[in-house]
Image: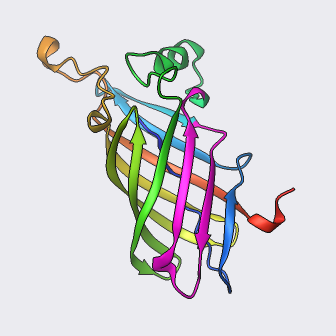
Amino acid sequence: MTRFLTAAFLLFPTLASAGSFTVNSAETSVGFEVIHWRLSTVAGSFSDVTGEIDWDASNPTATRAVISVPIMSVDTANGQRDAHLRRADIFDAAQWPVATFTSTQVSNIKGDDFDLIGTLSMKGVEHPITLHVKDMNDGGATATATMDRFLWNVVYGNSLAETGSIAISQQVELKINLAMTAADDRS
């Protein structure tokens, strides 16, 4: 549903100089929402996100980011559901413990907002995804994306053939709240 991790890719601050940054795992989350039986929204998040970002404010198109999201960190405020999400029929965290976003391009730069295009690798499958980054600053940013979970073989709840309805929405809304630290500030 969401590795989106992907998301944590908001790490592109408007700085006066070039530099390398790390994701502040304690303050970063990758959130997701799905619609359940067209009746309710189920929200969750991933924590313990890690990553490295290279940013040059004078050349933002040269930005590079690699962000990793540990699947075991999934939290929907329901322990039974979280355990199910980790099982083989959904995320298969035992076999695929990390989802990784790797940026490939920056486009549509408008001040502190831009699109960060990259590849999300999850469950052994890679597909492109675009993160819409907003309010980038020297401490982080927020980003949103919509992903089709079926592309990454997250197909649990696709009961259309049996019931005429999809139990869990195919589209997953992602929201990333990213905090970052200059690499030379790490302790």
Q: Locate the C terminus and report the quarter of the image it occupies.
A: bottom right
- Is 54 contained in the magenta span? yes
Find the magenta span and give its range: 46-72
Above or below for 61 versus 176:
below
**Foreground of the two, 121 or 45:** 121
How many marks are shown on the rendered structure? Answer: 0
- Is 114 contained in the magenta span? no
**Residue in view at x 44 percent, y 38 percent:** 2
Residue 158 visible, this orientation: yes
Residue 5 visible, this orientation: no
Residue placed furthest toward the right: 187
Above or below for 23 versus 77:
below
Where is residue 179, by image quadrant? bottom right
**Foreground of the two, 53 or 112:** 53
Query: In this figure, which colouring scheme has been used for the structure?
Result: rainbow
Where is residue 54, by image quadrant? bottom right
Q: Whole-percent x and y of residue 25? A: 70, 47
**Residue in view at x 49 percent, y 58 percent:** 143
**Foreground of the two, 106 or 42:** 106
Q: Is residue 103 left or right of residue 52?
A: left
Q: Is residue 170 left or right of residue 102?
A: left
**Residue in view at x 48 percent, y 65 percent:** 133
Q: Locate the N terminus and report the quarter of the image it occupies.
A: top left
**Residue in view at x 48 percent, y 14 percent:** 84
Q: Whole-percent x and y of residue 135? A: 56, 70
Q: Whole-percent x and y of residue 140? A: 64, 64
Q: Is residue 121 left or right of residue 44?
A: left
Above or below for 142 versus 16:
above
